Image: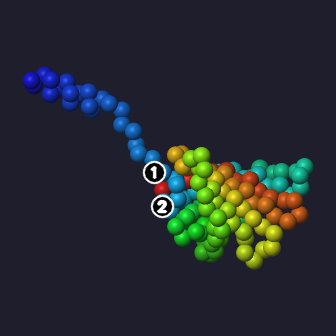
Amino acid sequence: MRNIFLSLTILLAAAPTVAAVPPFDGSAPMRCAIQTVMACDDPSICVRGTSATINLPPTLIVDVGQRLIGGSATGRTIKMTAIGRDGGRLLLHGVESGLAGISWNMVIVETSGAMSASVLGYGGGGFLIFGACSAV
């Protein structure tokens, strides 16, 4: 009997443990780090950069419950105007108040936290943003 108990203990200790990844479904606030930005002022010219390239903070705080995205040192936030879920992805949309003609979209993969976003403005310019979200 002791050998069986010892064998079970060894098997359980050797079993791989999987760290639980929180779902990125908007049920809790997330911290989304911007890793890469593509800034395009013209359809033929895009520049690869960082969050500083487009004057954004390096990390965004996404709070679906409050319908806000923040992270700026000034405390400035933007409001989500639409929230959806489809195909295992959280879909967020907003319009930049105070600047006519600016809209944005963000997609977060609910299982991994992979994030991509776009900001589109008047005159044909815009940004593509890539990053990863984690629990706050």
Nearer the observer, 116 or 67: 67
Q: Residues within 10 Å of mark 1 (few under 14, many from 20)?
A: some
Regarding residue 70, the answer to whether it shows in the image is no
- SS type, badge 2: loop
Nearer the observer, 47 or 16: 16
Q: Say which label, 1 or 2, has the lower sequence index.
A: 1
Residue that appears at 60% across and 75% down: 75
* Quadrant of res 60: bottom right
Residue that appears at 19% across and 24% down: 7
* Quadrant of res 12: top left
Nearer the observer, 73 or 131: 131
- SS type, badge 1: loop
Do the numbered discs 1 and 2 sit on residues whose CB atoms are within 8 Å? yes
Asked if 35 appears above or below 97 in the picture, the reply is above
The residue tagged 1 is: 22
Q: Amino acid at mark 1?
A: Pro
Q: Which mark is residue 129?
A: none
Q: Quadrant of the N terminus?
A: top left
Q: Position of residue 110 (x, y in %)?
A: 54, 49
Asked if 6 appears above or below 122 in the picture, the reply is above
Residue that appears at 45% across and 51% down: 22
Q: Position of residue 40 (x, y in %)?
A: 83, 55
The residue tagged 2 is: 28
Regarding residue 116, the answer to whether it shows in the image is yes
Q: Amino acid at mark 2?
A: Ala
Q: Position of residue 18 (x, y in %)?
A: 39, 39
Q: Residues within 10 Å of mark 2 (few under 14, many from 20)?
A: some
